[in-house]
Amino acid sequence: MPSVRITSRGLPRGSRRTAIGALAALAISTFAALPANADERHRVSSGETVSGLAAAYGTTVSAIVDANRLDARATIYVGQTLAIPTGTSPATSVATGATHVVVPGDTVWDLARTYGTTVAAVVSANSLGASATIRIGQKLTIPGLASASTATTSTAAATTATHTVVAGDTVWNLARTYGTSVSAITTANSLGASATIRIGQTLTIPGATAVGNATAAGSTATLATASNIASFGATTQSHTVASGETLSSIASKYGVAVSTIVTANGIKNPSLIRIGQVLTIPGAVPTGLVGDTFAGRTYASDVVASANQNKATLLSMQVPSRNEMQAMVVSTARAMGVDTALAQAVAYQESGFNMRAVSPANAVGVMQVIPTSGAWASDLVGTDLNLLIAQDNVTAGVAILRQLTRTSSSLETAIAGYYQGAASVRKYGMASDTQRYVASVLALMEQFG
């Protein structure tokens, strides 16, 4: 399909709005921007239900129904794209520990919100590991906010410190570095909701502990990729053999070796398994957190397994809120000389500013960067970037945008390259879904400009 060539770069705002009118109309009619309260997008597959999706994403049926204006029966259809809100406020809050018996649909993320504690606190109290996998009937210790704070706060005396902002600083990272909170720094310095800071600015850091006592959340997390997914796996799952399945396909689905399943189940002939047979899968990576299709494409099992592992890791980590992520995108774009409206539009289009977003293609985080693109971004900035870390993820996405805008023939082509790949756009032009993506980003730029 031929590339869209409506060039807006260098035009005044009114002219640019006129130039992109056709694309903006296309965006509104066929590819609406992600709702502000949506953490995920999900394309419905055969056999899926709203209750099943609620369990998979750690949210509620009513939240999905409300976000998508579904009817009273929560009717959905194959191919429909749903907004999955997973950022609702906790229903209750407890200050002391509690015990919870896991029921179908429970996730650690959902329980943390319900009890007013953190995912990290629940994971630590129950030794769940990075996958944060729980099973029906399991009794979990739910530490309250007080105990969770005690477990993670440095014993160093809190003081008020000052910090001079340097390139790459964000309020989120400074809060982690000094062992305080984003809200404390924002309030003390009257930064407003955007929490925008500038290089050379002197900040007051209230409640600071000694610098270096607070390790950035997720700094030791390992990004799962198709090449290293076999090294993950900390849970044991059960699998019921379905028609057409083989040990090889089952092993690939769970990211384990065929020999592992053979040994665990005492299978004498690996070519003979029967429909309905229940297999024990030791060392399996998490499943069900991320689907295997998006925008009509089905992804390889090792890629999907990696995506599920990364989703589980992010669910077990503390990450910035959507507002904090937006502020990080703005400050990073400014520091790297990228149009802040462009960076925000892409981040919103990709994830709704949700750092925990992971796609079936194993696109990770707020900027939805796949591992190979993350490696390219690391080369662009001259340092290794971990896509599971919020600031690294934003830096990777903004670095890619900077490179694409420098080397593309137009803004539209640069945006298309972020979604489809620059080489693919040059060779084949923009695919139909790419054109809708570009139109939506351009329309969002008008909102963020």
Image (spheres, grey):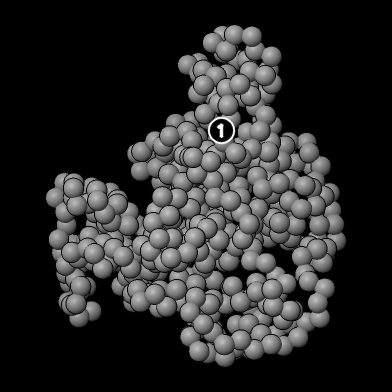
Image vertical order of residue 45 relative to residue 251, above or below:
below
* Helix, strand or loop for disc 1: loop
Closer to us: 219 or 61: 219
Residue that appears at 64% across and 37% down: 233
Q: Amino acid at mark 1?
A: Gly
The image position of residue 115, as x and y in percent, is: 75, 57
Q: Quick check: 148 left or right of 215?
A: right
Vertical placement of 262 versus 286: above or below?
above
- Left or right: where 357 falls relative to 28: right
Other-residue count near label 1 (Cα within 10 Å), few / some / many at <14 / 14–19 / ≥20: many
Residue 332 point in image, percent of width and height: 45, 73
Quarter of the picture containing the C terminus is bottom left
| As drawn, 309 above or below 408 | above
Residue at the location (57% across, 12% down)?
270
Q: Tell me the residue that label 1 is attached to.
A: 255
Q: Is residue 425 visible?
A: yes
From the viewer's perspective, tell me whether residue 160 is left or right of residue 351: right
Q: Is residue 111 above or below residue 11?
A: above
Q: Position of residue 62 (x, y in %)?
A: 58, 50
Question: At x 58% / y 73%, what residue is drawn?
Answer: 172
Which quadrant holds residue 121?
Answer: bottom right
Residue nearest the observer in this picture, 135 or 151: 151
Q: Residue at x 60, y 82 (%)?
A: 186
